[in-house]
Image (cartoon, helix red, strand yellow):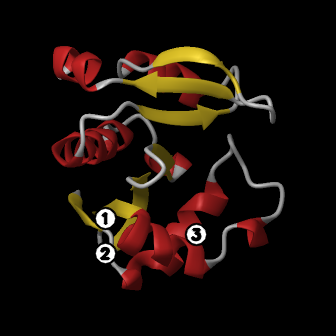
Amino acid sequence: MIFRTAEFSDIKQIQVVRHLVKENTLSNPDLVPDKDVAFYISEKGKGWVCEVDGQVVGFSIVDLKERSVWALFVDPEFAEQGIGKELHRLMIDWYFEQTKEKLVLGTSPNTRAEQFYSLQGWTPVGSYANGEVKFELSYEDWSRSA
């Protein structure tokens, strides 16, 4: 497994992984075009990928400007191998090196993702209008759990 910063050349494979997931699926795959991924990994924040045998099997993207996790997905065939946890660590460490501002994310309720974020030290603080659970992570909470 190789973990590294996401590059523009990874976008096609990032999209493949995004569409393979069984939870937090997109209602319409066209809602997240390649240009949006490029914008998030280059201008709004930063992204990371995990490669196995030259194929992207997981990725994470954080939005520094909006102070939110934009994406963290792992190919279901590679679940439960620590990939999500390492992508999360890389992303959160980088974020808190840039700012100490609280970070937020939303995820569908009653999913493995909801459980994952709770285990990583995130605090549920309510719900978004779309029904997703809203989580927050402070620098202090991350420092304690790291």
Quarter assignment of residue 144: top left
Q: For the residues carrying marks 3 and 2, which lies nearer the camera in this image?
A: 3
User: Disc number at residue 51?
Assistant: 1
79, 88: nearer the viewer: 88
Compute the Cα span from label 3 to label 1.
13 Å
Compute the Cα span from label 3 to label 2.
14 Å
Across and down, in percent, residue 137 comes to 39, 25
Q: Measuring 46% from the left and 25% from the top, which residue is drawn there?
A: 136
Left/right of residue 5 with respect to residue 46 in the rendered view: left
Q: Earlier in the sequence, mark 3 or mark 1?
A: 3
**Decide: marks 1, 2 in contact (CB < 8 A)?**
yes
Across and down, in percent, residue 30 comes to 77, 72
**Amino acid type indicated by mark 3:** Val
Please name the residue that numbered disc 3 is placed on.
16
User: Disc number at residue 54?
Assistant: 2
Left/right of residue 137 with respect to residue 145 in the rendered view: right
- Mark 2 Cα-neighbour bin, 10 Å: few <14, some 14–19, many ≥20: few
14, 142: nearer the viewer: 142
Q: Secondary structure at mark 1?
A: strand
**Amino acid type indicated by mark 1:** Glu
User: Disc number at residue 140?
Assistant: none
Q: Quadrant of the C terminus?
A: top left
